[in-house]
Amino acid sequence: MADAVNGRTPLREQVRRALQDRISDGRLRPGDRLYEQEIAAEFGVSRVPVREAIRMLQSEGLVDVAPNRRGVFVRSLDRAQVEELFDVREALEALAARLAASRASADDAERLGVLAERARRAWAGGDVDAMSAANTEFHDRIVALSGNALLASVLEPLHGRLAWLFRLNLEPERVCREHDELHAAIAGGDGDRAAELALGHVRASRTMVLDKMLF
């Protein structure tokens, strides 16, 4: 069933977000082909906003458009590309955590803690999808708390490119523990500690992802 079309957001953006979500949560996997006509029919729109959405996804590095109209495919990543993504994430997520620690209110910190606890409960209950969603929301929330719109716009496509791999989380206990520590640093207003923890968290995730991927 198609994601809701609400009539307020431009059609191209609605289609882009829906396809981005499907790439992030694994419904669309690297190498899968996207068919403009099928997407347009599903959403009840013309092919024009679909093409515009695909161009946006291409600029974000989420899809490849093969030449000579051979088709549109969810992008596959090689080892070098994954390494580059993590290089950027290390710097930017540490910055986001530092800024969040200096700007988050007590209510903000409490809501961040709720997300960390939600992920832990999902893990305990064996709900991989719920844990993945809570973990993604946890990181998105830290970026939002940074109060830096440019930082958020740069990090969003990076998360999308790797989210399908993070669903294959082989280290849920580590991830939950590190999120708890990061939450505590942000809640305590310790920017240096928050940045240090965020950097270590991304580096550990880099190792996990690279060990999982078959290049």
Image: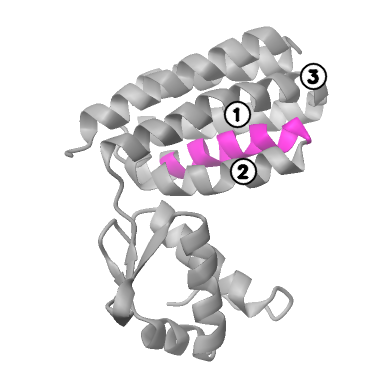
Q: Amino acid at mark 3?
A: Ser
Q: Which residues are magenta?
A: 132-147
Q: Is residue 96 above or below residue 49?
A: above
> What's the distance in space between the residues labelled 1 and 3, CA to CA?
16 Å
Q: Identify the image quadrant of residue 15.
A: bottom right
SS under mark 3: helix
Q: Quadrant of the C terminus?
A: top left
Between 61 and 212, the residue placed more toward the observer is 61
Which secondary structure lies at badge 2?
helix
| Marks 1 and 2 in Cβ contact (< 8 Å) | yes
Q: What is the residue that sits farthest to the front in this orientation?
A: 68
In the rendered image, which quarter contains the N terminus?
A: bottom left
52 to 135, vertically: above or below: below
Residue carrying label 3: 102
How far separated are the C-alphas under marks 1 and 2?
Answer: 9 Å
Picture layout, residue 185 above or below residue 136: above
Q: Is residue 29 visible?
A: yes
For residue 41, what is the image quadrant?
bottom left
* Disc 2 target residue: 154
Residue placed under numbered mark 1 in the picture:
92
Within the magenta stretch, is there residue 214? no
Majority secondary structure of magenta residues: helix
Q: Are marks 3 and 2 in contact (CB under 8 Å)?
A: no
Residue 78 image position (x, y, % from top left): 27, 42
Disc 1 residue type (three-letter): Leu
